[in-house]
Amino acid sequence: MRRVPQVLAVLAAGLWTAGAAPAIAGTPELLGFVSVTPASVEQLARRTYSLDSKVRLAAELRLPAAGPVPVVVIMASGEAEAGDRERAWADRLAQIGIGSLRVDSFQPRGLQSQGLYFDVQSIAADIADALAALQQLLGDPRVDPKRIAIMGAMRGGSAALATALEPLRRRGLRGEGHFAAHIALQAGCDVRYLAEAVDTAPVLFVHGAADDVTPAQHCREYADWFARAGAAVQFVGVPEARHDFDRTIPAAYDPQLETARGCDLERNIDAGFDRRLDTGELVIGPAMRRAYEDGCRGRGGHRAGNAAASAAAEQAIERFLRKVFRLAR
């Protein structure tokens, strides 16, 4: 266990490839750095993952101006066909003078995607990657270390929220740096990770009010918890918006779309147990957790791109980031 911090120390050294061109005027640059692949959030919180779980990531950095500039780490949603979403958000951020670092937690581990809810790779890997990306940016002189935020949609949004929890931040990051803000776009809040302490950075939830895949009510309850924990929280419910409203896709019902809307679980990282919110019953151990998840998951849900809803989300996120990053209008 004592050797694991040395693994993370690699993040601060040997990160630039020979002859790599600097990212200027929005030109994409591939940034290489090392992360780890914990099998569970508990492994990440306790640093009990294997040293053999190291993985090298290649994230796309865009800096729209000479530094130091604010940057948003954009986590992938986990849907193979949704890469256009992350690229579009990077474009939108560049238009208002904010850099971006797009992180893919799947292909470097040999996966094309994992959908919304899946078991092949724990979300702990996404959280570890997000913190590794933050570590990388904190040492980059082109980036303002006090103005690094994180955002993501669906699974990426869940990872963005989890990076606010102090037990995970302390184990995944060297030093006292932390994200300046956390943005969750239609995140899956069916499992809500809790801890005694959060980093108290501002948190923004943006959710479609008509989402029947990742229900807004779960995230409203998670937002309330963050507020009680001391974070400044905003929740934006976008009227009539269904799942994937920020993509250019036609409205359709997908009977095979996996959903965990029937799940409602708190996972306490400090105490190391789960609790069902519908019954108050404790869910202890992998077998009991598997049985619960198998029973609460289902299939079928609506997807629909919505230009008006997407514009509303853009405006909410822009207002939030301008305030957090102290940007002139």
Image: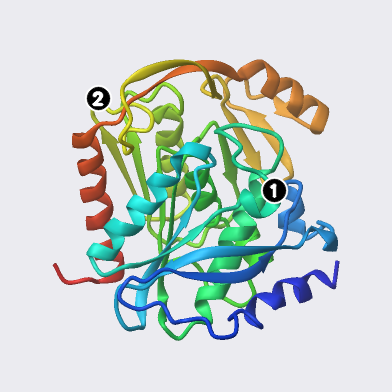
Does 199 sit above or below residue 258? below
Can you say which quadrant of the picture contains the C terminus? bottom left
In the image, taking residue 251 as reference, residue 164 lies left or right, namely right
What residue would you read off at disc 1? 110
In the image, taking residue 119 as reference, residue 253 lies left or right, namely left
Residues under numbered marks 2 and 1 in contact, where contact means CB atoms less than 8 Å apart:
no
Percent of width and height locating residue 228: 45, 47
Picture residue at 59% right of the left edge, 40% below the top:
113
Does 123 sit above or below residue 145? above
Percent of width and height locating residue 134: 53, 69
* Three-letter amino acid code at the position of disc 2: Glu
Picture residue at 32% right of the left edge, 83% below the top:
66
Q: How crowded is mark 2: few (under 14 residues within 10 Å), some or many (20 or more)?
A: few
Quadrant in the picture for residue 224: top left
What residue would you read off at disc 2? 240
Picture residue at 38% right of the left edge, 58% below the top:
202
Secondary structure at badge 1 equals loop
Closer to the camera in the image, 203 or 66: 66
Closer to the camera in the image, 175 or 6: 6
User: Which mark identifies residue 81?
Assistant: none
Quadrant in the picture for residue 291: top right
* Three-letter amino acid code at the position of disc 1: Gly
Query: What colouring does the structure picture have?
Result: rainbow
Secondary structure at badge 2 equals loop
Percent of width and height locating residue 220: 40, 35
